Each structure stands twice: as C-alpha cells, then as structure tokens.
Amino acid sequence: MREVVSRTPYLVGLEFNPDNRHTNLNELAMIRSLAFIAIAWSAISGCNAFGQTTSKLPTKAFFGSSQLGTISLSPSGKYLAITATGSSGHYELGIAETANLGALKIVQRFKDISIYAPRWINDERLYFALGDPGDLLGRHNGMHTVINRDGSGALQLNESVWRLLDDGSDDVIVSKATRNNTDGAVNSVELFRMDTHTMRRTALLDDLQPRNVTNWVFDKDNQPRYAYATEDDATIVHYRKPGQSKWAEVSRFKFYDPKAFSPAFIDGTGQTYVTMNDPEGFAALYRFDPEARQVASEPTFEVKGFDIRAAPVFESTTRRLLGFQYESDAPGTYWFDEKMLAIQAIVDKKLPATINALNCAGKDENRVCVVRSGSDQQPSKFYLFQPERNEWTVIGETRPWINPRKMARVDFHRFQARDGLSIPVYVTTPTDGASGPRPAVVLIHGGPNVRGGHWVWNPQAQFLASRGYLVIEADYRGSTGYGFKHFQAGWKQWGLAMQDDIADATNWAIAKGFADKNRIAIGGASYGGYATLMGLIKNPELFRCGFEWAGVTDIDLRFSVTWSDASDRILRYDLRTLMGDPEKDAAQFQATSPLRLHKHLTQPLLLGYGASDRRVPLVHGTKLRDEVMKHNDHVEWVAYDLEGHGWALTKNNIDWWTRVEKFLERNMQR
C-alpha cells in the first residue's frame, strides 16, 4: 500500500521500534460495537442511503458533511465531548461518560451555526468554538463559548482561548490582539488569565512585554518564557528566566533564513526544544540552552528525507514528555514513555491496517484512550480503549458509508525532475481490477508553499478514483515538508521550474505505465488553478482538458488588486521572496501570465470562483473567462455568490465536483 522510503526515524541516543507496514484491511475482531451516535443524532444524513452495494457512490458521500467531528477526552478520562452532525446540518455537542457511552446527552446545539473543537478546561467545564461557513464577514467564526458539562452555565467569551491551564481551575488564558489600521494585520498579542465564570481578567504579564509579539511559548507553570516578535523583515525571539520579568533577545533571523531556529516547546523539566534545519537542510528537533544561547550539536529527533514538525505529547499535569506525533511519508508517533509504547503496540496489533493516533488520560489502573484510526482507504474511525481491561468500544466513524475495501490505494514515490531534483509524488490508484495505463488526473495542490500530499483518506482523490481515474499529486519544488533545498528551489519559479516538475511528474507516470498518455486531465485550486492554466499553455501535448477553481490568472494581480486580503508585510516581503518583484521581475511575470497567454488556452476548460474571494478576487476569473471565450468554445464557468477562497459551503462543494465529474466524462473519452 505504501512504499517504504525512510519510515524509521534517525533518533540520537534513542531506541526506536518502527511501526508495521500495513498490507491488509482485515476487520477488527471481538470489539464491542456501539450505535449510540446514530441513535443520538438520528437525523444524520443516513449512511445507508448511499447504497454501499453500488459501484458508484454519489458525490455527497465524498463531499457532504462528515457524521463525526471532534472527540475530546476529559483530563481524568471519565468523559467524552463529541461533535456530530445534527438535523440542521450543523455540528452539535454531546457529552458522554466513558463508562456508559450509551447515555449520551446533547448539551448544546444551534440552528444556523456549528460547534467545533470542544476542549476540556477541567472535568466539569469545557469550551468550544463556533463557526458558520456561510458567514463571509466572520461575525461568528472562531468565537469561543464556555459551558458546564451538564449544559448549564454557558457564556460567550469576548476573547479567544489561547491556552488551557490543566491546573484543575476554571480559568483559561485568553488573548487580545492589536491590529494595524491599514490592512488589519495583527501587530501584537496580549495575554490574560480569565475566570470562565466571572469573566474577570488578570494580566498574565505585569511588566512591559516586548514589542510586536504575536506568539508565545509557555513552561509547565503556564508562564510565558519565549516571545516571538516581528520587525521589518526579521523574526526576533525573546526569553525570560523563571522568576524574572526582564526579557532578553536570544535570536534574530531574516525571514526564510535557512539557519534560523525557533523554540517549539518546553517540557516538564524546563528543557527547551527548538526546530532547526540539520546539516542537510531538513527540519529537525534540537535541545536548546537559552542561557548560553546554544543549540545542541546533534538533533534529538529527525526523519531522513522529511521536515519534522513534531507535536509533543505531554502528561497533562507534570508536562512530562511522553512522545511525539510527526509525519514522514505517513503520520506516526514516537513514544519515549514505555507504557504508552506498550499501549501503542497493542492498538497497532489490533488495528494493523491503519495509522492509529492515541489520546489517553487517567491513571494507570483506570487509563482510558481514544484511538483515532485511519488510512489512505479508511476515513477516521474512533474507538475507546481501556488497556487494563483490554476493553474496546467503537465510538463512531466520520464517514460510515465509506467501504474501505472499495477505496483507492495511495502510494508514495519519488522521481527525478529534469534537473535532477528529487520530487515526492503520491499516486492514488483505483481498486477496480483494471490493468494497464489508466485515464489520469494530475491534481495540483494550492499554497503553493505548503505540503500537499498526505497518506490519509483524501475526498478529492478518492472521488476521482471512484470514477476510474488515476490521481497524480506531486509535491513540486517550493512545497514544504521535504527540506529547505526543495522549498527554496521553487522561489520565483511560478510557471517555470515549478511547472516543469508537474510536466515531469506526468511523464514519469506515463513512463511507469500508470497513466494513459492520451487521456490525462489537469486540475487544482488557488496556485493549483494557476498551474492548471500554465500546464494547458506550456504542455498541450500532455493534457486534454483542465479544471481549476479560485486560481490565480495573473501574478501582477496578486499585487495590484487592492481588495485582496494580503497584508502589507506579505506584499513587501513574502510575495516578493517567493513569487517575485512586480518591478524587477516584470518581464518574467508577463511571460508566465495565463491571462496574457490566453490565446494558447485551446483545450476544454472548467473555471470556478467565489464571488467574495479576497485571496484571489473574482476579477482573476472574469478577466480570463472573457478573453478565453473569444476564441475557445469549450469553456465552462461558475461563480458562487456566498463563497470566498474555496468551497466552504457543502452544497457548493458537491455542485462543483458534480460539474467536474461531468466535465471529465465529456472530455476524457477516447
């Protein structure tokens, strides 16, 4: 299912047991199944209605709302907070005892808004965020509400919860942001301790904090120890010793400096860990001495060939470091703690076909774990596991109507681009039993300076595969997650070497016998939309048709459209570093502008845009549409009124992918 590239992390001074490579999808035996989710939320969009016996699931099965949202375990392990889709189509909040999951109680629901990401303040009180995908003004999105476990005492906060204290109190740390008057970007963030009953706030820092601080790193006593600040084109990190109020600068680096390091977290012993590139340019985790301002010579944790963004797992009260969650070709967990390592081994033996992430609470004798299980073919499924009793309960599934056996497999590969750079690529292959080269879709991720491919169940790739298409997703140069060299190789390469990587990925798939050279489409959103257009322009011999949504059609417009959401800093530094300078690189911008090269767009083309998009405003789409339609009779267009950058509304997401399916059916026949 997955190609082994470098799954064993190279750990300094640590012993590591690599996880098993999963090769089957056997059903879990002897697990007590529980249907309380379906009972409590009886109006959920019936999973049986999708017809598991049919060979072609409807679009809604992939892009409709998932049944389950978030499952959060209380500090003692006695309670679960669960969000699931209710009759209104929005997420509702339910609470259950882990000892009696069947007695679920729905404690909060709203008619026109969803509840997201519940987190426990303590066993009696929790908070959650509100969200409305259709609220483009953001009047409700992200607002936090606190509530008692029984549903009483609900209060809406005026600030956002920044951090939980895990000290047994009803208090949280909240933040107050100061924004500038020109573009609304955050200038600084102040922190306060708040009583969630009285709403009384106390300043967390009595002294004057450093200027322009936008992020913080805390110690186990919930005291800020590091403060991140920005100044012109540099990031500055300040540090203060325990028991002192004075801040001292410990690092200053220009944006995108490969030698930069950034404090990631502090464990219960007071040890600071920083993220920094190793000698080969891959992000790794190092110990750091703030007094000596010295980074350790050898990394504590790294995985060859991948950047590590290790998420630490702590024991809640002592902040003893138990392990790391990380991602290489697939997600994984490395445990320092022997007991957690043993629990992980039991879980992985029971669930051998999936990646299994643990969230555990409680003492050894009554430890309770929520297991989030998933793979390339299986959407997330949740179990409750009690190790001492070896007792398992199925909590529920995000998409129970999905049969993993009928989903496509995802494999990770690397190939050499024309200049020798190694390019990662994920290939999704339908499991329909067909042999030989297949019709294919080259699906390009947006960003572009993010990681695109992940070994998880991906609704877009799985939907296309369910319609018979091989899906090729290359993490072209400029993508992150694969080392600084890979990232930097994409600077100012829109339409140039980045575009060549996409063509090279396509030719690689043809040469491997994966893709039918005569039936290949190209598609993507945002930067992926731009690359779709440039692919049709530069390589018409490869792509029969293309579909793009929210795509950039002219690089100059990223700088000149005044109603964009790009901040002044992004315009002055980030875009000029990563995309190019509109004055110095004007000739390059013109030579790589789909809008200026529109006469070369002769293949069938499907365009989709959000009328309220502020990242890539609608003018990108309308200008290109009007020009291409003058000479191309095979252009399809849709604009969604209540959409921003991408499809936030389920109905629009379903509509768009239904259009994509029909578009490909019309244009990918022999």
Image (spheres, rainbow, N blue to C red):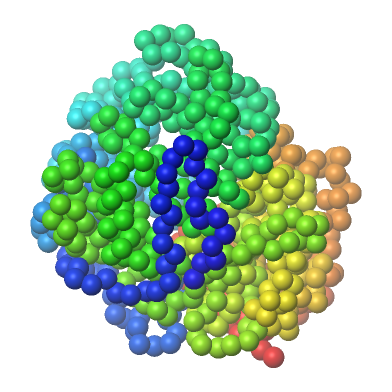
Return the residue nearer the eye: 335 or 251: 335
Return the residue nearer the eye: 249 or 271: 271
Quadrant assignment for the C terminus:
bottom right
Residue at x 26%, y 45% (from the top left corner): 339
Horizontal side of 315 relative to 65 (left or right) equals left
194 vs 95: above or below: above
User: Where in the figure is residue 414, as x and y percent of width and height?
Assistant: 65, 62
Return the residue nearer the eye: 441 or 594: 441
Return the residue nearer the eye: 518 or 530: 518
The answer to whether residue 613 shows anywhere in this view is no
385 vs 581: above or below: below
99 vs 338: above or below: below
User: Where in the figure is residue 25, as x and y percent of width and height?
Assistant: 37, 74
User: Where in the figure is residue 151, as x and y percent of width and height?
Assistant: 16, 46
User: Where in the figure is residue 373, as x and y percent of width and height?
Assistant: 34, 61
Q: In which quarter of the image is residue 295?
A: top right
Q: In which quarter of the image is residue 19?
A: bottom left
